[in-house]
Amino acid sequence: MSQGPSYAYFEGKIVPFDEAKVSVMTHALHYGTGAFGGIRAYWNDDEEELYIFRPLDHFRRVLNSGKLLMMDLPYTPESLLDILLDLLRKEGYRGDTYIRPLIYKSTPAIGVRLHDLDCDLTMFSLPFGSYIPNEEGSRVTFSSWRRIDDNSIPARGKITGAYANSAFIKTDAMNAGFDEALVLNQDGHISEGSAENFFLVRDGVAITPPIYANILEGITRRTVIQLLQDELGIPVEVRPVDRTEVYIADEAFFCGTGVQVVAIAEVDGRPVGDGKMGSIVGKLRDVYFNIVRGKISRYKHWNVPVYGTQG
Ligand code: PMP
């Protein structure tokens, strides 16, 4: 798991990873004027195949983030997928992998702005397992930080500068002995976790905050909404969620590409439900992991094979 990338896509071609270097004056490094994606690919042992999960959805979001940042990028979701396939085949991974595309204002320039700057793309991948410990029963707190508002930095874009907010949230939670934190938005309702979307379950209904709660438009969130309804027969309500609703919820969980689906066992020292992973979260995790690994044929349109499509 400690092995890093051997290659990166950088300045228009795949290069040895150590050659992918930027100037210390790069605009994005100073002003947070970049945006990124986080994609997973899962190894399917039976088929000896690496499946990328919903890459075109991820690349669409990356390019939309570029639009928010006024970047003129010569890519389509499909051309980004071609780059990714080349990269993964060159790495030759036979195990679970994380992929990081990053678009950034590349001009070495001083001066805060979005305009009159070049932009570029880099992409690399690395072997990757769990993102947070205690996936079947994480301990969570409410952060004293607030989520950045869409009118401050657009939450729907994965804008690098906005992740300083996530870093404050995550580190303070971990320093206080928790695995993760929930964040409230400016009006006091739940937004999401530091880098994952949030659901709770009450009386057999799954509830998740709306996009206008300053959440990232999560691809896992979208996946999970569909799976809860179609696979588990659980209705989903998208509506503002009060902090105290979590204290009386039957179940709660985080979801995201990195965390995958993580049960929340405890919030601010209060057990969620009976303090153990609930049955709905447990079933959702099972079906999710089978789908991402390409084991359920009716969802195979979400799995892009890396090696099987090699011509
Ligand atoms: N919210 C934030 C702030 C995130 O960084 C992420 C991870 N990308 C998510 C939610 C989950 O999004 P996705 O399911 O698309 O990975």
Image: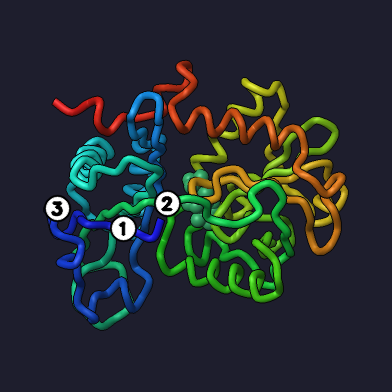
Q: Separation of disc 2 and disc 1 at Cα?
A: 18 Å
Q: Nearer the viewer, residue 267 or 64?
A: 267
Residue 110 image position (x, y, % from top left) = 25, 83
Q: Are marks 3 and 1 in contact (CB under 8 Å)?
A: no
Q: Nearer the viewer, residue 307 or 94?
A: 94
Q: Which mark is residue 256?
A: none
User: Mark 3 or mark 1, which has the lower sequence index?
Assistant: 3
Residue 118 image position (x, y, % from top left) = 18, 65
The secondary structure type at the circle numbered 3 is: strand
Identify the residue shown where x is 28% and y is 81%.
111
Q: Residues within 10 Å of mark 3 (few under 14, many from 20)?
A: many
Q: Which residue is mark 3?
A: 14
- The quarter of the rendered structure image containing the C terminus is top left
Question: Is residue 192 left or right of 125 when viewed as pictured?
Answer: right
Q: Nearer the viewer, residue 113 or 20?
A: 20
- The quarter of the rendered structure image containing the N terminus is bottom left
Identify the residue shown where x is 50% and y is 28%.
291
Question: Is residue 290 left or right of 180 when viewed as pictured?
Answer: left
Q: Residues within 10 Å of mark 2 (few under 14, many from 20)?
A: some
Q: Which residue is mark 1?
A: 102
Q: Which residue is mark 2?
A: 128
User: Mark 2 or mark 3, which has the lower sequence index?
Assistant: 3
Residue 70 in view here: no
Amino acid type of the residue tagged 1 in the rendering = Leu
